[in-house]
Amino acid sequence: MSALARAITGWSLIRAFTVLVYLFMFLPVAVVVLLAFNANQFGSFPMEGFSVRWFAALWNNDAIVRAFKTSVLLGGLTAVLSTTIGVLASLALVRYDFRGKGLITTAMIAPILVPEVVLAVALLLFLRWLEMPKSFLLLLLGHVIFTLPFVVLIVQARLVAVRREFEEAALSLGANGFQTFREVTLPLIMPAVFAGMIFAFTISFDDITGTLFWKPGGVETVPTQIFAMLRHSISPEINALGAVMVVVTVAVPLLGAAIARRMATTLK
Amino acid sequence: MSDRQPVVELREVVKRYGNFTAVQPIDLSVEAGAFVTLLGPSGCGKTTTLRMVAGLAAPTAGDILIKGARVNDVPIHKRNLGIVFQNYALFPHKSVFDNVAFGLKYRKVANPEIAKRVQRALDLVQLPQMAERLPNQLSGGQQQRIALARAIVVEPDVLLLDEPLSALDANLREEMRVELKKIQHQLGIATIFVTHDQSEALAMSDKIIVMNQGRIEQQGSPEEVYTRPRSEFVARFLGNSNLLDGRVLGRADGLLRLAVGGLGDILAEPDGVLEAGDGASLRLVVRAEKLRLAASPTPEADVTNLAGRIETVDYQGQSARYFVTVGAHSLQVINPIDQRPHAEGAEVSVQVRARDIVLLQPE
Ligand SMILES: Nc1ncnc2c1ncn2[C@@H]1O[C@H](COP(=O)(O)OP(=O)(O)OP(=O)(O)O)[C@@H](O)[C@H]1O
Ligand SMILES: [Mg+2]
């Protein structure tokens, strides 16, 4: 066997291929982030000077600032609602036996399995049937439905691992159901609750398909704002906005994961 | 004691899961300060019974009373219990202090008083320095003690223990067994203890309740249950027994003479309860340690001498276990070792005193 043939083993091929796939996926993102700092109006390589002027332009663009605020508000509310409902649903599904449990589980997980467009249209048709206009509330509802399965799956997995005896011990010591939840169950599932919340926020923050269907006229989130701007031209501002999006959707989960890990180590 | 009201009482309590009956109608009572053990093989319904007392499972039928009041519909957190779980179930996110203080918080005890009582409980379980630690910084035995402290600090009406020692290794188990019994006795808390370990049950209990397939086979003091088993199951479950079938031949000097097929005649003291006319078939239970091996027969009138041959010797330190062939039977014998154990293959006299034979109605 020659030296070359020995070097090209199956594993090294797989490694090389993996690197290529990741390059294909992340190179465009890197280019966007890089070009966001380009001084030139017409973003192209080689870059001509470093500048943050496009970020400044973002800051001064009312439409974008408004979209950003909407996204943060929507993401925040979605996270809070989804997590609250998700935790309660998980408790019911894991700790209690009742009729129709399987059906409810399926219904709650379904939004992950159904294509987002179908879900978006369905909710819209439902609204039409109720003869209600589109509103921010509908948008919020859509995002909650869409992010709920993630929260439920994460929290359920954790709850199954929390032994029933902890709760039984608390009850036997005189704590009622709610006190037991607050003092024992919730702290023990907190890392999962937190992770679910981060998930819900991030998914809501960069969702575009459903949002395009559900948003009332005049309301834009960051993704729909980018989408709208793209229709006119590719401006460097979009690169800057893209860079901000990347930072938010990467930094929030990373930060969240770090905090969740901290919490988990104090528990275990 | 007899005229005092029992702390816990079960009346005709049944538990069914679907059409499987985990607990048949059972009656039992726990007197004030008593240490009562539910003993039985795996799956016999011990945990289920304990959980019904705790309020963690609802009985299908029957009444559960604590201090004379029916508690079937009282939720667990209002029953004033102390439970020690098999895996301790210490709250992993709370310090030892907060674990032990947990029950006091919900009894509206003032903070300085909580601190005092927690400290007293920690002193009692001999871990006064551990208040600041988290449960995962404790050894298994220490966790066990903290779990006990957490359960007793609230001064419960009943202490419920579900195999609390089974997660410990053998030496620690022995030590905790003594400790637990000492603390229970000192505080005088009525206690229900669940185990499938007969030596634990015999060593710790005031009363043993032997369960089998959801039913109570026998209850009584350890000595009673051990020396006077009232069913074959109890005889087999506690200690090492030889079981033989006999037929009554007649009576002489207040003793029954029984013919045991393939073995010979045996003298037994008649059991007052049993109806045993001539020709009646009876089951004989002979404890392995009640059979005595000797070089030659003894002339005592109430002792049966049988000629046997030692098949195997199992050396156990202070005592030895033998399998001895007598006629068509192989009998298990456990005897203390005098100087050296009997030799394998030796011809011996196997002796048993009439009062050491337990007679049962054949099943
Ligand atoms: N939730 C349940 N649903 C159905 N059957 C059950 C349930 N809990 C217990 N059982 C059954 O009831 C019987 C008694 O169970 P239990 O846990 O009381 O046994 P145990 O005496 O404590 O045994 P072990 O020594 O193994 O702990 C078992 O056959 C068990 O399978
Ligand atoms: Mg059990």
Image (cartoon, coloured by chain):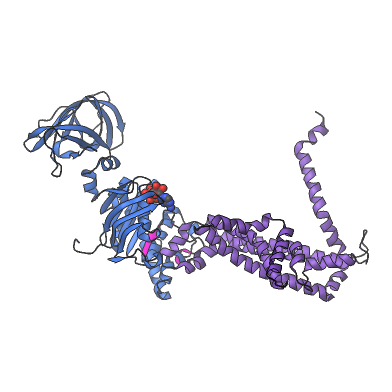
Chain colours: A purple, B blue
Q: Looking at the image, can residue B300 be seen?
A: no
Q: Is residue A21 above or below residue B283?
A: below
Residue B275, picture quadrant = top left
Q: Position of residue A132 (x, y in %)?
A: 70, 72
Tell whether position B94 is magenta. yes
> Residue at left 36%, top 64%?
B81
Residue B181 is covered by the magenta coloring: no
What residue lies at 76% left-to-right and 65% top-to-bottom? Answer: A213
Q: Give the quarter of the figure containing the C terminus of chain A.
A: bottom right
Could you tell me residue B267's position as x and y percent?
Answer: 13, 34
Identify the residue at the far left of this view: B253
Quadrant of the image for the N terminus of chain A? top right
- The residue lying toward the viewer, choosing from B130 and A260, is A260
The answer to whether residue A164 is left or right of residue B67 is: right
The magenta-colored residue range is B81-97
Q: Position of residue B5 (x, y in %)?
A: 23, 64
Q: Is residue B5 visible?
A: yes
